[in-house]
Amino acid sequence: MATRWGIIGTSNISHDFAVAMGTLPRTEHLITAVASKDKVRSREFAEQFDIANAYDSYSLMANDTGVDVVYVGTLNEHHYSVSRLMLEHGKNVLCEEPFCQNSNQVQQLIELAKSKNLFLMEAMWMFFTPAFTILGEEINKGIIGEPLQIISSFGTPMSESLIQQRNSGGSILELAVFSVYMSQFLFGPEKPQIYGTCGQLTESGFDKSASIILKYSNGRISTFLSHFKVDLPNEAIVFGTKGNIKLYDPFWSATKISVNGTDINIDVPHTEKATRYGNSVQLIYEIQEVRNCLLKGLNESSIVPWSLSIENAILVEDIRKQLGVTICK
């Protein structure tokens, strides 16, 4: 029987989520509903992806008995409220990263999922990609020796007017979250010392750029940049005592990885419709993880467990505070 999905929000990432799901068997994954606050956008999205139900209310989605699990692809500031509404109405939830705007909201959602015996996962799709799997396997084999340094970046130019409108988090929450998660994946669950932060804030108090140094035990360091004004390499390199592994642009969905100078190219499924973000057809791997967890009766994924989401939410919050960002309550 197919897992019946509802999509909340008609954003670019929701579009790519639906495009990616289109490469999977409909006998396993079926989008049965889409919800947006804009009725026209919901109907257009439904028509584009052959979805039976189009809602202009999140409550209608919450009460749809034909939906097993919802994907929350709204703006960041709505992740918490929408996910909470769905959990309260008995829906399993896959929520786009970053999970919430602060660690308290993340903990509240997890406690609610526990009490309702429901599945909940932050959609950190980077962890499920083939490149990231190769990264972990090669490091575990000791191919680069002891990993001691990570250098990564994510920068994409935006107009100043658009930057000023981004009151849902800034460059750390929207871009550097991938670098934070990568750091904790390789060097955690230890909480690092935030050794250095530097950045520029918008008039409304959110970061438009940031340069961060995280210091872990045994000489391990992660250095990363995020920026709304300039293009950055958008690559990640892990340096060890015997070599290095490089994930090419975009490192969070790389289709090329270099292990000690030897390139590995990764094939991804063909899509009938173009995606709006690079290589985002790889969302299929987290989609498959959700179905596997539901079939096994699991409430959380072992790859992106609740504990990891809490650890990272706390770390991201502390980084933003050091930058001078006002944290939403």
Image: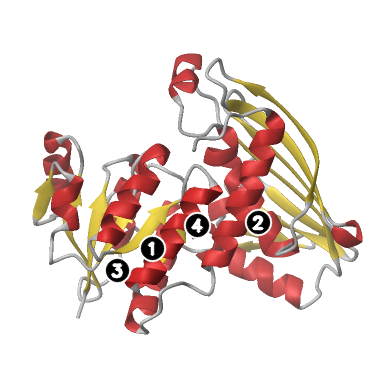
Q: Residue at x 17, y 49 (%)?
A: 59
Q: CA distance from mark 4 to mark 2?
A: 21 Å
Q: Seen in the image, is 250 located left or right of residue 57? A: right
Q: Seen in the image, is 240 located left or right of residue 47? A: right
Amino acid on which disc 4 is placed: Gln
- Residue 258: which quarter of the image? bottom right
The quadrant of the rendering that contains the N terminus is bottom left
Task: Compare residues 105 and 128 and report the one nearer the observer.
Answer: 105
* Residue 169 image point, x, y percent: 51, 34
Task: Say what secondary structure mark 4 lies in.
Answer: helix
* Residue 148 image point, x, y percent: 85, 59
Q: Is 306 situated above or below 155?
A: below
Lower position in the chain sequence, tag 2 or tag 3 = 3
Viewer-nearest of discs 2 and 3 = 2
Task: Compare residues 29 and 144 and report the one nearer the observer.
Answer: 29
Task: Say what secondary structure mark 1 lies in.
Answer: helix
Amino acid on which disc 1 is placed: Leu
In this rendering, does residue 327 appear at all? yes
Task: Compare residues 310 and 212 and report the one nearer the observer.
Answer: 310
Q: CA distance from mark 4 to mark 3?
A: 32 Å
Query: Which residue is denoted by mark 1 in the rendering?
Result: 112
Asked whether the beta carbons under mark 4 and mark 3 sit within 8 Å of each other, the answer is no
Lower position in the chain sequence, tag 3 or tag 1 = 3
Query: Which residue is denoted by mark 2 in the rendering?
Result: 182
Lower position in the chain sequence, tag 1 or tag 2 = 1
Lower position in the chain sequence, tag 1 or tag 4 = 4
